Image (cartoon, rainbow, N blue to C red):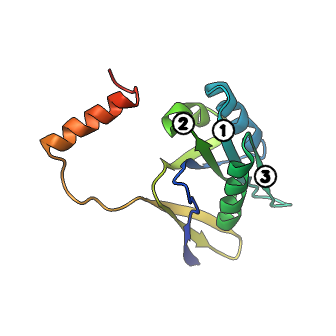
Amino acid sequence: MELKIIKIDNPSSLNLILGHSHFIKTVEDIYEAMVNSVPMVKFGVAFCEASDPCLVRYTGTDNELIELAKKNAFALSCGHTFIVFMKYIFPINVLNAIKNVPEVANIHCATANPLQVIVAETEQGRGIIGVIDGSASKGIETEEDIKNRKELLRKFGYKQ
């Protein structure tokens, strides 16, 4: 077994969801979950098929995001892995809908942070061991940090 670190290419720090599922219809069902959750949503999704012909399957509503999803899915090449890139929305807007897709087995992360994926490779194929999502903690929040966090959530409309 060989361990690899695959850096997710996300030059615009877009929000993304990385997960694992179990069936080829994942790409179509995630498409439906996205468009039924947020009207006119802009996204691209790609899915690594785990049995022959082992293709990266893809769809979406935005060609740039579709290309980004395809590129990153192929770089990962981990069976039954999917990646969704989105614009103008946060993962919180679609995460439960994606979790409720019957074939989705696991969500590894939902982030806009720099992302590294720890991949194990054997003679059979590749699988995700875990993710490095963003940076290590630099301290404990202060009262001022708490105030700023609360203001940010209200600015985005997630709290009143």
> Is 78 left, or right, of 153 in this rendering?
right
Residue bearing mark 1: 42
Percent position of residue 54, x then y: 80, 61
SS of the residue under disc 1: strand
Residue sitting at 77 percent across and 49 percent down?
58
Residue bearing mark 3: 57
Residue sitting at 13 percent across and 41 percent down?
143
The tag earlier along the polypeptide, 1 or 2, is 1
- C-beta proximity under 8 Å, tags 1 and 2: yes
Residue sitting at 57 percent across and 58 percent down?
10
Q: Label 3 sits on what residue type?
A: Arg
Percent position of residue 129, x then y: 52, 63
> Is 53 left, or right, of 38 in this rendering?
right
Q: How many marks?
A: 3
Residue bearing mark 2: 89
- The C terminus appears in which quarter of the rendering? top left
Percent position of residue 38, x then y: 61, 27
- The N terminus appears in which quarter of the rendering? bottom right
Q: Label 2 sits on what residue type?
A: Ile
Q: CA distance from mark 2 to mark 3?
A: 23 Å
In the image, residue 30 sits, relative to residue 11, either above or below, namely: above
Q: Is residue 30 visible?
A: yes
Mark 1: few/some/many CA within 10 Å (<14, 14-19, 20+): many
